């Protein structure tokens, strides 16, 4: 049988057939959609309506009903700065030398040698903007700034909105302090992102955009509109004032997301914009970790399992659901495959493109590297996923008292850390990680233990060794941090 592109066919027919092949084949031609990454800060995996919460989040829920909901979604780390660095680079954060959150005036930061998705997309002609929490370097210093990491425009804070989400005064716009602003952080962040997007529209530029809208909410110190707090106190009299304020905080973010989605539709950008909405890690509070063990900073599921959804009407089927485990480190390789960009070839990229999952081709998805989480400060310190199996391990220095910030004393201990006390859980029927299968499944345990040991040694050997002043963290209370 001759090919449909046989040279015996007339030229017009051959061209028509070629056009049809390209039109129906999802991987033949690279595309340049817009990309929008929306992060909540410290939100639990059941803190939005479409993941079982009674908090009203209709706009966030729309992203799931109009796109894909990920039931096994994970942050790149169980802690803030590492998670963000992993998402931007596709590399597991300890490989970057981002071992924990960035305290004030710390030497740790995302080094300029690293390559971010913003840098890659900028080279492809994308307009790039960052709005909200930054927290991967110290702003207004000689550490790499958003502009050094590929962002044309930035409206950011070092860490949390201060003094709270209400009337923050610590934003920096393109290297200049902004001063005190009136309003709530999530609304201010969306205001700025919409102003930037509107200017792009007015310029009649045909350049696609990449935007990070990284909310501060619901990280403490929390501030929420009084009318929303009163609403939840009335709806659910069993809630404490603290819980009602938290509920209101999440809804306020949802209202901000709604404003952003409405403008994308108004400007006819929604159809070809991939939106990824998730949280940077698990929750700090106990009432948001429904059905999971552990919380923020733990390598238990509660520390890094988060809600996740992607909407891209042009390519993702509305109302679809994926139960394959994905992580923030998968974003960069996914974008690279969609756009046809080359992944950085001179370094290890730990994530795997999830484009087959987005297109419903789960059988074509094969993860290149195991999902891996390491947090030196708590024990257990390491987790690794392989299908439904979750391996959890401690490190040899686990009982050594550690300060909250990364100190000079921590660095050699991290570099020399060895894994011990392995536990094995099957998440298919035990999300709360209560039944240890280490003794009953020795073959699985040994296979995953060898993988974990090899990957941990590889990651830690590459991770940057920071020259931290001896005085840093000396006054911090040192203790053995509770693993849960």
Image (tube, rainbow, N blue to C red):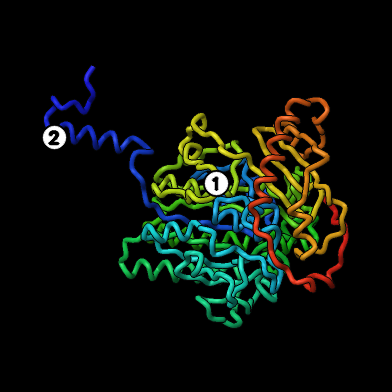
The secondary structure type at the circle numbered 1 is helix
Q: Residue at coordinates 47% horizontally, 70% vertically from top-left?
A: 153
Q: Name the residue under label 1.
A: 330
Is residue 474 toward the left or the right of residue 191 in the image? right
User: What is the spatial separation of the Cα atoms under label 1 and label 2, in whole angstroms?
Assistant: 41 Å
| Res. 59 in view | no
Is residue 462 toward the left or the right of residue 310 in the image? right
Q: State the residue in front, 363 or 240.
A: 363
Residue 233: image location, x then y, percent: 75, 61
Q: How many neighbours does mark 1 have within 10 angstroms: few (below 14), some (14-19), or many (20 or more)?
A: many
* Direction top: furthest residue: 1
Position above or below: 289 against 21: below
Residue 34: image location, x then y, percent: 41, 55
Is residue 399 toward the left or the right of residue 452 in the image? right
Is residue 204 toward the left or the right of residue 377 in the image? left
Q: State the residue in front, 165 or 339.
A: 339
Q: Earlier in the sequence, mark 1 or mark 2?
A: 2
Q: Residue at coordinates 59% horizontally, 66% vertically from top-left?
A: 134
Q: Name the residue under label 2.
A: 12
């Amino acid at each position: 049988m001759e090919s449909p592109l046989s040279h015996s066919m007339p030229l017009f027919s051959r061209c028509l057939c070629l056009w049809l092949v390209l039109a129906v084949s999802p991987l033949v031609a690279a595309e340049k959609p817009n990309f929008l990454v929306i992060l909540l800060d410290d939100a639990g995996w059941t803190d939005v309506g479409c993941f079982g919460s009674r908090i009203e989040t209709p706009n966030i829920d729309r992203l799931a009903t109009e796109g894909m909901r990920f039931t096994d979604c994970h942050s790149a780390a169980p802690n803030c700065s590492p998670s963000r660095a992993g998402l931007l680079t596709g590399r597991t954060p300890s490989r970057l030398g981002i071992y924990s959150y960035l305290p004030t005036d710390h030497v740790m930061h995302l080094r300029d040698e690293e390559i971010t998705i913003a840098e890659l997309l900028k080279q492809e002609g994308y307009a790039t903007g960052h709005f909200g929490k930054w927290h991967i370097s110290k702003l207004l210093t000689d550490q790499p700034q958003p502009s050094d990491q590929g962002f044309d425009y930035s409206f950011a804070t070092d860490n949390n909105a201060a003094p709270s989400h209400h009337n923050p005064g610590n934003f920096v716009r393109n290297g200049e302090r902004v001063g005190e602003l009136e309003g709530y952080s999530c609304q201010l962040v969306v205001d700025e992102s919409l102003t930037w997007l509107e200017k792009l529209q007015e310029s009649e530029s045909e350049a696609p955009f990449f935007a990070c809208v990284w909310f501060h909410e619901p990280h403490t110190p929390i501030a929420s509109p009084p009318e929303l707090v009163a609403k939840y106190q009335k709806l659910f009299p069993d809630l404490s004032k603290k819980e009602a304020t938290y509920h209101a905080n999440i809804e306020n973010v949802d209202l901000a997301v709604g404003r952003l989605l409405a403008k994308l539709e108004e400007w006819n950008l929604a159809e070809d914009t991939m939106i990824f909405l998730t949280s940077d890690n698990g929750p700090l509070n106990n009432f948001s970790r429904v059905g999971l063990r552990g919380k923020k900073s733990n390598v238990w599921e509660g520390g890094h399992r988060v809600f996740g959804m992607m909407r891209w009407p042009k390519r993702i089927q509305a109302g679809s659901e994926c139960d394959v485990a994905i992580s923030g480190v998968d974003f960069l390789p996914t974008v690279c495959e969609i756009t046809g960009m080359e992944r950085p070839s001179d370094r290890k990229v730990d994530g795997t493109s999830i484009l087959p999952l987005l297109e419903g081709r789960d059988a074509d998805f094969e993860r290149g590297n195991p999902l891996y989480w390491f947090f030196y400060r708590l024990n257990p310190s390491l987790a690794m996923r392989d299908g439904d199996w979750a391996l959890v391990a401690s490190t040899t220095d686990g009982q050594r008292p550690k300060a909250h910030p990364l100190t000079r004393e921590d660095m050699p201990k991290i570099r020399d850390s060895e894994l011990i006390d392995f536990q094995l859980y099957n998440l298919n029927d035990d999300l709360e990680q209560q039944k240890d299968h280490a003794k009953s499944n020795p073959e699985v345990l040994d296979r995953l233990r060898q993988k974990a040991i090899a990957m941990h040694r590889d990651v830690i050997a590459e991770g940057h060794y920071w020259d931290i002043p001896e005085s840093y963290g000396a006054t911090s209370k040192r203790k053995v941090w509770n693993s849960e």
